[in-house]
Image (spheres, coloured by chain):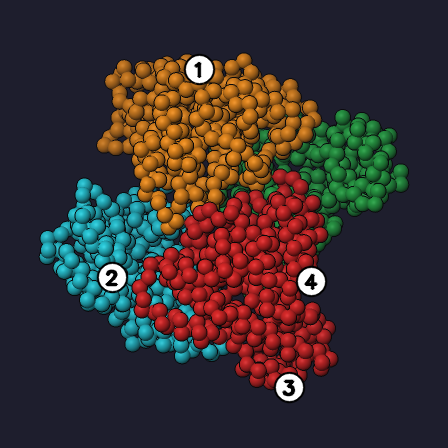
Chain colours: A cyan, B red, C orange, D green
Amino acid sequence: MIYLKNDYSEGCLPEVLDALTKTNLEATTGYGEDEYCLDAANKIRAVFGCPDADVHFLVGGTQTNQTAISAFLRPWEAAVGTHLAHIATHETGSIEATGHKVLTAFAPDGILTPEMVRDIVAVHDSEHMVKAKLVYVSDSTEVGTIYSKAQLTALHDCCRELGLYLYLDGARLGSALTSPENDISPVDLPQLCDAFYVGGTKNGALFGEALVIVNDALKPDFRYGLKQHGGMLAKGRLLGVQFGTLFTNDLWFNAARHANTLAARLQDGIVQKGYKLLVPSPSNQIFPIFPSELVEKLSEQFAFEVQSEENGFTCIRLVTSWATKDDAVDAFLAAI
Amino acid sequence: MIYLKNDYSEGCLPEVLDALTKTNLEATTGYGEDEYCLDAANKIRAVFGCPDADVHFLVGGTQTNQTAISAFLRPWEAAVGTHLAHIATHETGSIEATGHKVLTAFAPDGILTPEMVRDIVAVHDSEHMVKAKLVYVSDSTEVGTIYSKAQLTALHDCCRELGLYLYLDGARLGSALTSPENDISPVDLPQLCDAFYVGGTKNGALFGEALVIVNDALKPDFRYGLKQHGGMLAKGRLLGVQFGTLFTNDLWFNAARHANTLAARLQDGIVQKGYKLLVPSPSNQIFPIFPSELVEKLSEQFAFEVQSEENGFTCIRLVTSWATKDDAVDAFLAAI
Amino acid sequence: MIYLKNDYSEGCLPEVLDALTKTNLEATTGYGEDEYCLDAANKIRAVFGCPDADVHFLVGGTQTNQTAISAFLRPWEAAVGTHLAHIATHETGSIEATGHKVLTAFAPDGILTPEMVRDIVAVHDSEHMVKAKLVYVSDSTEVGTIYSKAQLTALHDCCRELGLYLYLDGARLGSALTSPENDISPVDLPQLCDAFYVGGTKNGALFGEALVIVNDALKPDFRYGLKQHGGMLAKGRLLGVQFGTLFTNDLWFNAARHANTLAARLQDGIVQKGYKLLVPSPSNQIFPIFPSELVEKLSEQFAFEVQSEENGFTCIRLVTSWATKDDAVDAFLAAI
Amino acid sequence: MIYLKNDYSEGCLPEVLDALTKTNLEATTGYGEDEYCLDAANKIRAVFGCPDADVHFLVGGTQTNQTAISAFLRPWEAAVGTHLAHIATHETGSIEATGHKVLTAFAPDGILTPEMVRDIVAVHDSEHMVKAKLVYVSDSTEVGTIYSKAQLTALHDCCRELGLYLYLDGARLGSALTSPENDISPVDLPQLCDAFYVGGTKNGALFGEALVIVNDALKPDFRYGLKQHGGMLAKGRLLGVQFGTLFTNDLWFNAARHANTLAARLQDGIVQKGYKLLVPSPSNQIFPIFPSELVEKLSEQFAFEVQSEENGFTCIRLVTSWATKDDAVDAFLAAI
């Protein structure tokens, strides 16, 4: 079975495993206050150009979103995202579990616009309704698209004007930033976002996400929330070691670039054979549409997710990663 | 610096790291539904003699307690524990964060008794108060003591009579079960508890706890709670690989036994030199009381936690683990 | 200023005030356990034909919905309603505040259909998403429409089949049940719903809603939730006295009928003058569309809510109640 | 049966009922934004000498505590009170239901001291524990005692120094302020507290509490929390009418003074007959201790609460109110 199912099917980059192995028997202090975490945080501050940001390491994306958003909002404040937003669809109501509504706008390409935000804010104009306060975007998005710098800047300006926080879910930020179509630089992110996270799980780490809090107002006492949501790993240094390695010698960027290259080859090949896409993707998730019979046949050889089915056609999701091999792309293109 | 600070200062047992390395590049399905998790769950069911139990793997203890207790209780139901209970003191209100009160009884030796439970239930006798519903015990306890089979059986009987669940926090269950003073067999636990967890983080895993749900009423839909609390690891197989290894060839038991042996040698040596203990401990956490000046001097060479200070004396906590070396014990005993 | 703004602009029916006055100096036990509450609960059980139902009295609608829904659901379970559902729009996220997501289907006429429910359930098919568990309907709906017996029966059957609870928000149940177009009998409700509430605030009481729990599984320990959400009124008898009065001599029904009659005359008059409606309403809330200039002029003489504005036209909401006078209707019709 | 059971056994002061009756058919805007609420808020600001305070009207005490405390705290912050604190004991975990722990100190006389607060803050010194942030006091306390100005000032100073909010539950504030032993003036309260509430339910209103928010930092967006917790009464003017009446011609003070006078006569008579008290009370709740046989006999003629039983003696609670008659006191003294 060839896995094109997701970017967390394998363990981690060999360099990451080596670093964990080398440091395995060292004794360090716990809970993310060790030297490895301090070093990794500094590397992230340097790469993203935000020397004053707070950096916290968490285990997974749902946990990071839940911990951050619940720490940032007052009880009646709500998050705003697209109808595809991961927090709105695939995190089992984890934001609501902390008391907050997620307001959504229909956006088939996964890109949230200032107009959508303005419409939602305009409707929520009294204390009988929740108060929109935090804008949630994913880059790359849930359907593989990415934000342009102009789009993210427009959202930032809109948020600033309306008194909203801008929070970016970077589960697949590596893929976004290394996409050929991307014009956002790592150092742009702290200028545009109040907080964002740098995804490790889906880009070469065994696990782990690095939350970067830029806005001073959101920094105090965050570690209380971290602990309260079970996000303060006893052996915190595992996260420090991994992120320190990922942000040495561009490992994190190169891993993502590899995934993008293979995804682009896969997508181009599919289009050349005359198949349609849900939406063209410049990142490591692509969404081709095949006759349902073909999909059934493909599923014997390949592991992938089914996105939707309609009228004899099935849209599937193919995901590449640092671990995907050229052979897998060749085999898939040969099979269609 | 010699670490006697906790049992999560190092990484993991070499065998665990080997297993992670060997399986690193295999592609598996995510979220704990892979073959490694299934296998590890079966091994745990076998060791603890509960073929029908549900086994879920989580990353850490706070997360496990929070996810389990919030899934088991209705909104107004409360947990009952000692005043030292980890959920009552050192988890940043994570149980309250899910809406539930933790009721506590004063128990300097960390052991909860049926009388304490009965007293709390008796007081909480109307809908103007929370309803006591789940009894929380830690074995070993927060001060290193362990439950006898008679004690745990008495609690079980009391819970059964009063309609309460009995939940056991097994962060240091390995140390408890391999203590020379222990008379509880692994297969007793499912007979006595509605749910319990088998600690990995503090006994040789990189991270991870295995929650065992015995009571059928508590099983349905638990994975929803797992996901909602960020406890469903994308690369769930990391947990399966680790627990599968720990429960092969008694690795988990042997690691704990090693820690206990060193702790006993440490405690005996301390007592022989005429120092007092907060409470005698048969497990891998010990609590000696030294003159405060001596503690200050020790802290130059050894890393440990301070428990309390009074009248020129300081109670410290020393913890041994699978990674602690004989030399460390020798050095400590030489230093006092 | 003539109020057509809502059905809670005035105090209460004179009969209700008389009853409160007559019983004012009696001493009773508190918290809803007095004779007046017992009597009122029995009257409600008799009128709605559910001798075994539990009846609880609460102060307001948001409180009732929040207390009921949070008591009925497990942490990851969600409510399902239309996009107009009061719990989804105008209760400041009170359901989310207790941890539960509200899933919505677009329904401009306010009527939820089994197809909408099925679609939502079909999409939410894994533990990565919330679990749809409770269907929320309002009768009359937020736009004045009412359910037919066939519609409510179809929803009931769908809920039964899918394992969902059916909960009916009866803030304006009096208006629905006494509408000329209504074919649901009071005694049908317990056959079709797992729980519903009988609105007092908007139909002649000073305040108060009576929650009727039919499904045995939802009954235990509900009073704990009542107290926890601040819904257990110290002088609970105030609610008992009011509902006992409302359900004597058909007072509650007659009050609603009066409101409906005036609303119908108002709506008919408006239509006869050539104006359009958002949707024809058979109940005490109507939604005419007027030129915006006319609305501005009307607002000098009449108090009402603006629903929406578009292209020079404004849809307003007019609400009649037990307290509305014929003169008010005459004046409004004269003014347009 | 003569009621000495609580101060909410009857309806309301005749003046309050008259005011409700007179205004019954007036139409006003809803949700506490009517003229009666504005007027009542101004009267309260004048009486308590806080022209800039925000005043919100709620229905009951549990609701007020829950709404205020959950609005004031961040997710990991905790309230601090005595072990008798109403929020810790008799509100069914309503604070925990909003995610916050209640930390308690043992205080048999119901008075919280700065030392108790300091001890709790000292223990909670890391992000592994909740962060103490709000001090909760009741005046009069749960056992009838009252704070002196020196005591409340000391708490205020301690809170200021430690960065804590001071919140005063005034369910029985009328009784405290009119006690012969009281030296706190109404205008002292806003100088000493960040927020406090003025109890109506237990001092002559049908229902209602007036929350006074003094600290500017706690004011923004509070009405969202009010609505979210079901505390925004549709016919908000009912609260305005009541509080406007209570704070006209010293009605609220006189009602409380009456209750205190009778309670003092009752307590003095009991003591003169040689019986002991749990603690001497200068307010409208007294706690005499009688032989249990006598208590049983008294219960045939009088309604009261039993506080505790021990060794053949029973401590009971007797409560007087605006509605208690001299005859009741005479009868009780005659019966013992």
Which residue corresponds to mark 4?
Answer: B108
Which of the two marks, 1 or 4, is nearer to us in this view? 4
Which of the two marks, 2 or 4, is nearer to us in this view? 2
Residue C296, can we see it?
no
Amino acid type for the residue under numbered disc 1: His
Which residue corresponds to mark 1?
Answer: C258
Q: CA distance from mark 2 to mark 4?
A: 57 Å
Residue B235 vs residue D69, the one in the foreground: B235
Q: Quadrant of the C terminus of chain D?
A: top right
Q: CA distance from mark 1 to mark 4?
A: 68 Å
Q: Are marks 1 and 2 on the same chain?
A: no
Q: Is residue A57 left or right of residue D117?
A: left
Q: Are marks 2 and 4 on the same chain?
A: no
For mark 2, name the chain: A
Amino acid type for the residue under numbered disc 2: Ile
Mark 4 crowdedness (10 Å alpha carbons): few <14, some 14-19, many ≥20: some
Mark 2 crowdedness (10 Å alpha carbons): few <14, some 14-19, many ≥20: some
